[in-house]
Amino acid sequence: MSDPLLPRIQGPGDIKFLTIPELSRLAAEIRELILSTVKKNGGHLASNLGVVELTIALHAVFDSPRDKIIWDVGHQCYAHKLLTGRSASFSTLRRSGGLSGFPRRDESPHDAFNTGHASTSVSAALGFLAGGRIRGTGGMAVAVIGDGALTGGMAYEALSHAGQLGLPLVVILNDNKMSIGPNVGGLSKYLSRLSMKAKYQLFRRTFDALVRGIPLVGEPLYTGILRLKRAVKAVFYTDNFFVDLGFEYVGPIGGHSISALLQVFRDVKKLGRPVVIHVITRKGKGYGDAEDDPGTYHGVSAPSPHQGSHEALSFTEAFGRSLFMAAERDPLVTAVTAAMEKGTGLSAFKQGFPDRFFDAGIAEEHAVTFAAALAAQGLKPVAAIYSTFIQRGIDQVIHDVALQKLPLILALDRSGFVGEDGETHQGLFDIALLRPVPGLRILCPAGAGELGMMLDWALARAELPGGPIVIRYPKDRSAAGIPAFSQPLAEGRGNWVREGGGKVCLAFTGGLYREVLQAAAILDKAGLGADCYNLRFLKPVDEDYLAAVMNRYALTLFVEEGIREGGFGEYALALARRRNCRGRVLALAAEGDFAGLGTRQELLRANRLDGEGIADYALTGISV
């Protein structure tokens, strides 16, 4: 048995002189470590298993960090981390204080650019090339794009600019037919047609090698044949999309053949002009379950303690069930998502109502405007998008939806602290970004039943002009069977989930229901007594009612799972000042830098938004 290779790899330079058999052994070791680590820590499995050979070949040919390798989305960078000196710390992946599951510039000089959202790699790589030209630093730039990122419009803007500049950009098109689910749209079909030419590409490479191998006349003959072939193609055929933009196109080639990848990358490195290398890979490669079901194994959760049966339903599941039942009752209800069918709980809706389900691909801007037009057509669209990704569609929410007062419903999953995916995926900014938009309403449920009631309330108002409605909820299990959650909605007001004449009012955004009850119990023991007010509506607000609430208590503490600046708590503080409220009013929310790695509970604790933190803040506030 040979000694393991991976522990000897301290940087990309250590693999450049390994043989093909040794590189294949290294690939197997990398897959084994990725699989064992993700089973313990959670993480992106199928996407990382699919690019192991591709990553090895890139680092064997290119010279990171001088040559910049940009990973689009970034959730396929685990092998890259292992080859760039981080194998010894790989057990800390996605853990608080450990390695990020995405590229991080402050983690390694080999992580050239932070990524976490899709379709940014070509822009970044092109910027590195342009900057290097101005500074005279040299070096190449490689953008690895796939997993549906080419369904995002930003990638096309960058490809167009790259063709115009003519810099030696290398775009690796990692074609695995998948984003999180199967790729959708015309481009996916176009790439499939290109992939069908693989046999031709194999024949071409074999023929070219034979011609060039002829003694004395091989190279001149090859050059003549190449010119003749291009002339014939120019007369009779239209080149592919990438060639039309100004790129050389190479491929498709097998993405799990290290020898083929090495040969192509070495040739391309000498080319000196923009090139697209079309690589065919299989998502989940080497792990049968992930190969058979890459969607399920795209993201794997870490083991978690058993949840009680009364908390079995997640907010996502509650949303999916509620929307399905609404669609059964009303043929105008439609669902739109941006490549997040499973993540947003819409798989059952897709199966039950395929003609009313639309997956726009990784293109949030398009998804919002598309859904806006459905609303203008008299339908009742619900666009389910992660909070972190709605940031990419803010202009569309303002310009295409709110300005026209269209009754689009936005279901923002993963609002608040998301956890192990780190800074790029936290959903902390939606309140601050969306609350200032005129005519937009924001609701925040505390449980599954309340979420369903809010969705029905919003759909009933979709028949009336009045603007968009946002329903935001966390990535968490939902408390169920709470009588207060079934109280009817009153626009602009919340409801009391605990009321008994206490000195402190804890007014909270719904996802913090458990933490607020824990804080109330601590305050009870301290002799203060605490009432708990579920805000429900973050906009509009019945200001007379809320001002009366703030006047009733010695301390009203607004507890918010969102960024403090521009959030609801700051609005409430300003309202208290305008109305000269007698009681002390404070706000507790996420503050400081971007929230990093950790479980949701760890991040809540770090921001004093767990039960003890809320109670301590209230005790300090009332004693001042």
Image (cartoon, rainbow, N blue to C red):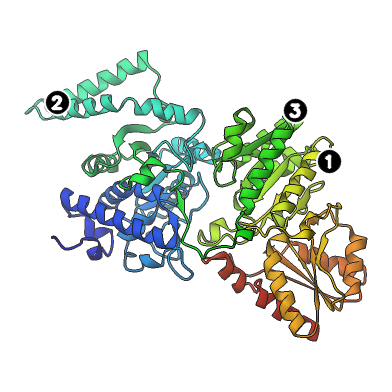
Instruction: Give me the C-alpha separation between circle 2 and circle 3.
Output: 61 Å
Q: Which mark is residue 377?
A: 3
**Between 595 and 553, which is closer to the camera in this rendering?**
553
Q: Which element is circle 3 on? A: loop
Q: Which mark is residue 466?
A: 1
* Residue closest to the far top: 236
Query: In the image, what residue occupies the spot 80% across and 63% down?
Result: 571
Tags 2 and 3 touching, CB below 8 Å? no
- Position of 539 with respect to 345 (left or right) is right
Instruction: Give me the C-alpha separation between circle 3 and circle 1.
Output: 15 Å
| Residue 321 image position (x, y, % from top left) | 65, 44
Q: Amino acid at mark 3?
A: Gln
- Position of 314 with respect to 169 (left or right) is right
Query: In the image, what residue occupies the spot 66% across and 33% down?
Result: 370
Which quarter of the picture shows residue 215?
top left
* Residue closest to the far left: 215
Q: Is residue 468 above or below residue 313?
A: above
Q: Which element is circle 1 on? A: loop
**Between 362 and 225, which is closer to the camera in this rendering?**
362
Can residue 278 be spotted in the picture? yes
Q: Which element is circle 2 on? A: helix
Can residue 359 be spotted in the picture? no
Q: Amino acid at mark 1?
A: Gly
Q: Is residue 158 above or below residue 596?
A: above
Q: Amino acid at mark 2?
A: Val
- Position of 600 with respect to 12 (left or right) is right
| Residue 518 image position (x, y, % from top left) | 69, 73
Label 2 sits on residue: 211
